[in-house]
């Protein structure tokens, strides 16, 4: 679980990123369902972190927090859409790119959360 203190963000960032990377490395095409569950889990935890920060941190800009939550929801939608429609041909390359893109987006979101 996430805590709303920002001092735990580097530890959580590494744990979440490694969770998705490990799942994507070990799964095959038959396990799209597990990849989708991991994407939902990661995005849900990020969203819960921002909600907790908005509720328990007194000096937070609500508009910026709303923008971060919107970007998390867009990320989830985009990644689930990409997993659902795998490109034929280079499937391994497709999932490597998906993993790299997810990792970079999660890094950006963590930086936004840290700056709230």
Image (cartoon, rainbow, N blue to C red):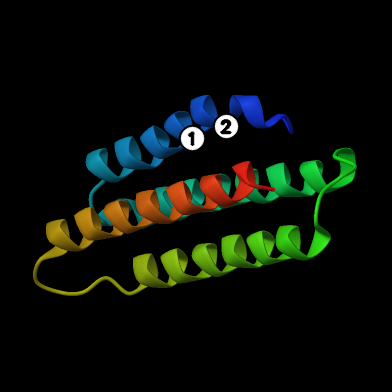
Labels 1 & 2 near each other (Cβ < 8 A): yes
Q: Where is 66 relative to 103, above or below? A: below
Relative image position of residue 23 (x, y in whole percent) = 34, 40
SS under mark 1? helix
Q: Identify the residue under disc 1.
A: 13
Q: Residue at x 72, y 29 (%)?
A: 5
Residue at the spot 43% in from the left edge and 56% down from the top edge: 105
Viewer-side residue, 23 vs 99 = 99
On screen, residue 52 versus residue 94, left or right, reads: right
Q: Is residue 12 above or below residue 94?
A: above
Q: Position of residue 29 (x, y in %)?
A: 24, 56
* Closest to the observer, 86 or 4: 4
Is residue 47 visible in the rendered image? The answer is: yes
* Residue occupying the point 80% across, 56% down: 61
Q: Left of 48 or right of it: where is 16?
A: left
Q: Residue 112 — which label? A: none
Q: CA distance from mark 1 to mark 2?
A: 6 Å
Q: Secondary structure at mark 2?
A: helix
> Which residue in the protein does label 2 denote?
9
Residue 74, position as x, y percentages in the image:
55, 69
The residue lying at 61 percent from left, 25 percent from top is 8
Q: Residues within 10 Å of mark 2 (few under 14, many from 20)?
A: some
**Mark 1 Cα within 10 Å, few/some/many (few <14, many 20+)?**
some
Q: Disc count in the image?
A: 2
């Amino acid at each position: 679980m996430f805590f709303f203190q920002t001092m735990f963000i580097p530890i959580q960032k590494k744990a979440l990123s490694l969770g998705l990377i490990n799942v994507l490395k070990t799964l095959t095409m038959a396990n799209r369902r597990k990849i989708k569950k991991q994407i939902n889990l990661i995005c849900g935890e990020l969203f819960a972190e921002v909600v907790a920060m908005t509720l328990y941190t007194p000096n937070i800009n609500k508009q910026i927090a709303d923008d971060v939550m919107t970007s998390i929801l867009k990320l989830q939608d985009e990644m689930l859409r990409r997993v659902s429609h795998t490109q034929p041909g280079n499937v391994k390359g497709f999932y490597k790119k998906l993993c790299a893109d997810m990792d970079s987006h999660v890094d950006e979101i963590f930086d936004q959360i840290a700056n709230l």
